């Protein structure tokens, strides 16, 4: 059992921008150093590294020798892109809770601000794997793959573009309060949303996350050490991964019910390991590469019933300060930065510390999720 | 579609599907022991774990399960025809067999030949084949209900 046995003692990040100097490795080192400083822990103490597989090869050794880390005795990588974020923190917590490691670092560093850096644009002429069953017909980009599910969702449950706009507008309002957010100075109106250009109908420009350069890191230590740390401890209360039956990453069209994705499997395991339920959670950071992932995740993690996720976003329900469940209080992937969802982990920690720029009063637990639509993961943090 | 078209890599597991398409037939993989259909093709039956495989020719009839209309930025081969439609079709034999494809006005017509505003989830379609390079891609045309 890992429940509350570890805590996030430090968080760190680079600036977020369309274009930053330096390599992904340099940005990773900046964020990790900032997280270690935040935790008041020396680099020599780090003995575990958990990262995404989409990083460059040999990344642990490069990070370790650049920052002068100690002997690394636990290292793991998690796949499936945006599904990996919470899992890297979860693996860090498992390593520390089991005694395999004493100071674990998890991070994401990403240079995707430049158009030429997008993986979908680098596909070769012969496509293999699951993509062989979708790319030849012009289903090319992640947005196309999720738009397919979004159209079906809107058809089955009568969800509207106005309801998808609720997510985009709520996160933009939160970003407008967060000086670190890319969209801090850019308000967004419903008219702007509804008149924006299409990217893949039924999704428009503002249904998409940003493309960002940036890095975020966190430091996981035993709970007893965190109590004496520089900040109030933020406990890792529960962690789960989820890869549901017959799932296919992104093009999840082949299972019994494609609208019940990996989040449902992850959610069942997550709540099984928790002392509280969705009704007790007052703030959430939900992976938002695309707006339809918000209603799907609200359903998957049990905040409402099947088909009710889009309606849940109405009446300011996911907005700070008065919503039932303020979501993505730093602006999320759609308006703060898209660091593959890892900035959501940092915001979850800030909410538990009481230092968010949109601090939810009385929030003592926070759900953080990683990508829905891919094999995924989630964390429950608590004060 | 142009010389930049994306084509599937054909391997031992998927080859009968593409051979069927070249012959103008929509063939689906099934378990050689319990006979459950499955898609996309794979080596093992998820129901009974048999490695025995058989291929069956489908009627080619199905319904639109969902669709999208991609707009730029896109890869060069698709920029020229954007906006176009991509559909997911569920097959009549088993609605859990869902294939990505395009709805076209007639066999051989381009993938932007149908007005996207007229596409409806649930509308009946039937398979056609579109030769691109050395591969016959299944596409879909409207069928009378």
Image: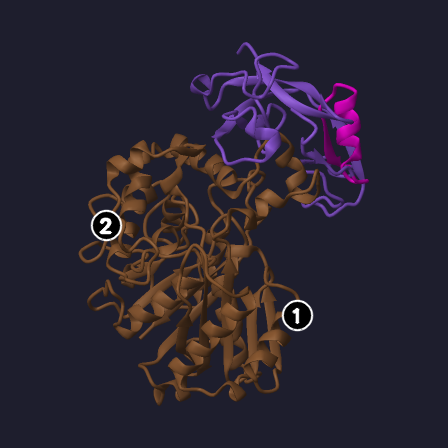
The structure residue drawn at horizontal position 38% and vertical position 80%, both measured from the top left corner, is A38
Q: Colour of chain A?
A: brown
Instruction: Determine whether label 2 and label 1 are within 8 Å by CB.
Output: no
Q: Quadrant of the N terminus of chain B?
A: top right
Where's residue A277, x and y in %?
33, 62
Mark 1 belongs to chain: A
Query: Which residue has dot 2 on it?
Result: A317
Range covered by the magenta-colored residues: B11-31
Residue farthest to the left? Answer: A322
The quarter holding residue A199 reads top left
Q: Was residue A47 drawn as part of the magenta stretch in this picture? A: no
Q: Residues within 10 Å of mark 2 (few under 14, many from 20)?
A: some
Residue farthest to the front? Answer: A21
- The answer, for residue A9, to whether it is visible in the render is yes
Where's residue B109, x and y in %?
62, 15
The structure residue drawn at horizontal position 63% and vertical position 22%, both measured from the top left corner, is B139
Q: Nearer the viewer, residue A333 or A255?
A: A333
The structure residue drawn at horizontal position 52% and vertical position 39%, both measured from the top left corner, is A145
Q: Nearer the viewer, residue A176 or A202?
A: A176
With A29 as the anchor, is A233 left or right in this view? left
Residue farthest to the top? Answer: B144
Inter-mark Cα distance, 2 to 1: 44 Å
Q: Was residue B12 drawn as part of the magenta stretch in this picture? A: yes
Mark 2 belongs to chain: A
Which label's residue is closer to the chain start, 2 or 1? 1
Query: Which residue has dot 1 on it?
Result: A58
Where disc 1 sits, the SS reads loop
Q: Colour of chain B?
A: purple
Q: Nearer the viewer, residue A287 or A305?
A: A287
Where's residue B42, x and y in %?
73, 43
């Amino acid at each position: 059992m890992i429940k509350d046995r570890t805590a996030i003692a430090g968080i760190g990040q680079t600036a977020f921008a369309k274009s930053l100097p330096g390599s992904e490795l340099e940005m990773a080192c900046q964020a990790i150093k900032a997280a270690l400083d935040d935790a008041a822990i020396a680099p020599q103490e780090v003995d575990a590294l958990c990262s995404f597989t989409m990083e460059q090869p040999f990344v642990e050794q490069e990070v370790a020798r650049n920052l002068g880390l100690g002997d690394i005795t636990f290292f793991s990588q998690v796949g499936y892109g945006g599904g990996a974020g919470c899992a890297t923190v979860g693996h860090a917590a498992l390593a520390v809770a089991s005694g395999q490691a004493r100071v674990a670092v998890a991070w994401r560093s990403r240079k995707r601000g430049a158009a030429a850096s997008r993986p979908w644009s680098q596909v070769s002429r012969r496509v293999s794997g699951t993509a062989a069953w979708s790319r030849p017909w012009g289903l090319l980009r992640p947005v196309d793959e999720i738009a397919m599910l979004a159209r079906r969702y809107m058809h089955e449950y009568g969800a509207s573009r106005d309801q998808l706009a609720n997510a985009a507008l709520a996160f933009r309002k939160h970003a407008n309060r967060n000086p670190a957010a890319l969209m801090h100075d850019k308000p967004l109106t419903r008219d702007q949303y509804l008149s924006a250009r299409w990217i893949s109908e039924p999704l428009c420009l503002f249904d998409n996350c940003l493309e960002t350069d940036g890095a975020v890191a966190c430091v996981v230590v035993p709970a007893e050490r965190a109590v004496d740390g520089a900040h109030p401890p933020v406990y890792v209360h529960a962690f789960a991964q989820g890869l549901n039956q017959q799932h296919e990453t992104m093009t999840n069209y082949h299972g019994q019910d494609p609208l019940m994705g990996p989040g449902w499997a992850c959610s069942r395991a997550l709540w099984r390991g928790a002392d509280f339920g969705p009704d007790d959670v007052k703030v959430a950071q939900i992976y938002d590469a695309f707006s339809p992932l918000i209603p799907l995740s609200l359903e998957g993690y049990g905040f409402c019933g099947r088909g009710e996720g889009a309606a849940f976003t109405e009446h300011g329900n996911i907005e700070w300060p008065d919503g039932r469940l303020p979501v993505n209080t730093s602006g999320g992937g759609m308006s703060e930065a898209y660091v593959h969802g890892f900035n959501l982990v940092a915001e979850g920690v800030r909410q538990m510390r009481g230092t968010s720029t949109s601090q939810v009063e009385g929030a003592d637990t926070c759900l953080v999720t990683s990508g829905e639509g891919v094999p995924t993961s989630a964390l429950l943090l608590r004060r | 579609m142009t010389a930049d078209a994306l084509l599937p890599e054909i391997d031992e597991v998927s080859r009968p599907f593409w051979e069927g398409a070249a012959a103008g037939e929509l063939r689906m993989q099934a378990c050689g022991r319990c006979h459950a259909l499955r898609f996309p093709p794979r080596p093992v039956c998820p129901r009974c774990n048999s490695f025995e495989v058989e291929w069956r020719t489908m009627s080619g009839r199905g319904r639109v399960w969902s669709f999208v209309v991609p707009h730029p930025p896109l890869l060069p081969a698709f920029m020229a025809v954007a906006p176009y439609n991509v559909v997911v079709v569920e097959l009549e034999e088993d609605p859990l067999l869902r294939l990505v494809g395009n709805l076209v006005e007639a066999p051989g017509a381009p993938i932007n030949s149908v007005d996207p505003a007229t596409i409806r989830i649930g509308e009946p379609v039937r398979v056609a084949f579109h030769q691109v390079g050395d591969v016959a891609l299944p596409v879909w045309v409207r069928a009378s209900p």
